[in-house]
Image (spheres, grey):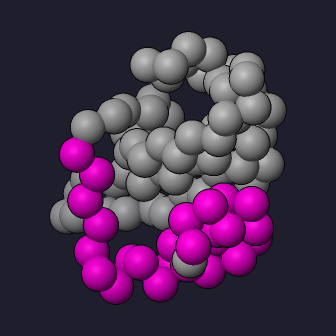
């Protein structure tokens, strides 16, 4: 399942604090492991837009390598249809 939602919570980035403008989540499963890939549109205090890719396990966002199966990219595209600002920034 892929979901999209508007957020407005603050997050930390290497460039300082930013707000989550939009976020999409694509649920993943490998054997018994369950996690989700997150793609977030962030806005820094100065108005600059940033895109963050992360994955979640047990509700905690983790940065690091994010790997998706090619077939899950279609689910990501579908979720981006419900997150127009993020989809525009990514060009998808």
- Residue at the (49%, 63%) spot, across then down: 26
Q: Report the side of 82 relative to 77 (left or right).
A: right
Q: Report the side of 45 relative to 72 (left or right).
A: right
Relative to the observer, which residue lies in front, 53 or 46? 46
Q: Report the side of 41 relative to 35 (left or right).
A: right
Q: Position of residue 32 (x, y in %)?
A: 24, 57
- Residue at the (73%, 23%) spot, across then down: 46
Is residue 26 visible in the rendered image? The answer is yes
Q: Which image quadrant for residue 61?
A: top left
Indicate whether residue 35 is drawn in magenta.
no
The residue segment tinted magenta is 65-91
Q: Is 77 located above or below residue 35 in the figure?
A: below
Indicate whether residue 75 is drawn in magenta.
yes
Query: How many marks do you count on the picture?
Result: 0
Q: Quadrant of the N terminus?
A: bottom right
- Residue at the (61%, 80%) spot, across then down: 78
Is residue 20 visible in the rendered image? The answer is no
Q: Quadrant of the C terminus?
A: bottom right
Q: Report the side of 66 relative to 49 (left or right).
A: left
Q: Position of residue 2 (x, y in %)?
A: 57, 69
Relative to the observer, which residue lies in front, 61 or 14? 14
Relative to the observer, which residue lies in front, 1 or 40? 40
Q: Which image quadrant for residue 50?
A: top right
Q: Position of residue 30 (x, y in %)?
A: 22, 64
- Residue at the (42%, 54%) spot, across then down: 37
């Amino acid at each position: 399942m892929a979901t999209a939602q508007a957020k407005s919570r603050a997050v930390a980035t290497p460039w300082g604090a930013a707000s989550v403008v939009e976020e999409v989540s694509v649920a993943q499963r490998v054997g018994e492991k369950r996690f989700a890939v997150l793609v977030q549109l962030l806005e820094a205090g100065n108005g600059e837009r940033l895109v963050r890719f992360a994955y979640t396990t047990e509700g905690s966002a983790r940065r690091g390598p994010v790997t998706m199966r090619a077939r899950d990219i279609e689910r990501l595209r579908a979720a981006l249809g419900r997150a127009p600002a993020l989809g525009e920034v990514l060009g998808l």
